[in-house]
Image (cartoon, rainbow, N blue to C red):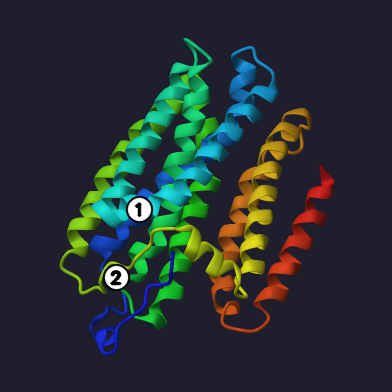
Amino acid sequence: MRIVDVPPGAADRLACQLPYRAFGPFLFASSVIAAAYGTSFKLPEYMEVLGLEHDVAGFIISSGMVTTIVCCCLAGRLAQRIGIMPTIAAASIVMALAMAAFAAAVADTRIAYAGGMLVGVGWSVLFILSPLQIIRYLRPTARIQHLTILSGAQMAGLGLAAPLGHFLTDYTDSMAIMYALFGVACVIAAICVDVARRAMLRIPSVPMPHIEITLVTTVALLRHATAVPIAMIVVAACIFSGLSICSITSAQSRPFLPGIHPYQRGASLFCRPYAGPSTRTSACAHALYRDRCLIGVVHCQY
């Protein structure tokens, strides 16, 4: 996968801001899919309701990590053939199927494993391709702002997953119904992606880049200075996933901690607009290092 290169003179035709009729539905869909992904953090609680051990939730999420890695490598190939937005819309439907599988786990808990794998498919495709769709229509100077807003929308979805999940569970008295409702929301998100796609057809853009991941391009990428940031992202993703699961499990045994998980997402959302400008300075790597250290210190409370 390579960065979108803007041909000479083409940058003048690109927009400085995406219209609301295109960016609004896209942000909403990204938030919904992120929220659906965030419901996977409630799997330990769900497995306990179904009479299973918390370890089962770990195995389900691990199965999703496998499909996440595979789809990260294949998403570009599919998008190259059918387009980025149709691929994201298909990922939304896959996420809806994942929520349906979790809801059906009441009848057979083995279906939850399929749900975990589908969650990995849906989330990885959205997370990989959504930034590429945005930067094709924007001037280089406007990309950081829009990508920051997009990332903030996804973090907002992750943050809302836990409190909204608790509310729906309390209201319906069933976690299965909660997952089913998130599945309906994912279908609506797929419709929003199509609405955004139609709106973006009227906006000038650069040609579709070559975004397939191959062994040759991967080796060439890792030989450059990008190898260290990629490794940092991998480690941070592992820490994020593990601590998110453990924080919820810990919250169940500590009455003063149940609300800590949504607040973590809220803090991330609040700091997101201030992180964008720091990427323009040479202190970006130092800021990332401090963030990782801060995460380790904060989670010592558990």
Left or right: 251, with 276 as reference point: right
Q: Nearer the viewer, mark 1 or mark 2?
A: 1
Residue beneath the point at 63% across and 52% down: 237
Q: Earlier in the sequence, mark 1 or mark 2?
A: 2
Judged from the image, the secondary structure of the residue bearing numbered disc 1 is helix
- Which residue sits furthest front? 216
The residue at which mark 1 appears reads as: 77
Q: Quadrant of residue 242?
A: top right
Pointer 2 residue: 18
Is 132 placed above or below 61 here? below
> Which mark is drawn over residue 257?
none
Q: Give amino acid for label 2.
A: Leu
Q: Position of residue 82 (x, y in %)?
A: 24, 51
| Residue 229: percent from left, percent from top | 63, 67
Residue 4 spot, x, y in % from top left: 37, 73
Query: Residue type at mark 1?
Result: Arg
> Callout 1: 10 Å neighbours few (<14), some, many (20+)?
some
Residue 25 can be seen, yes or no: no
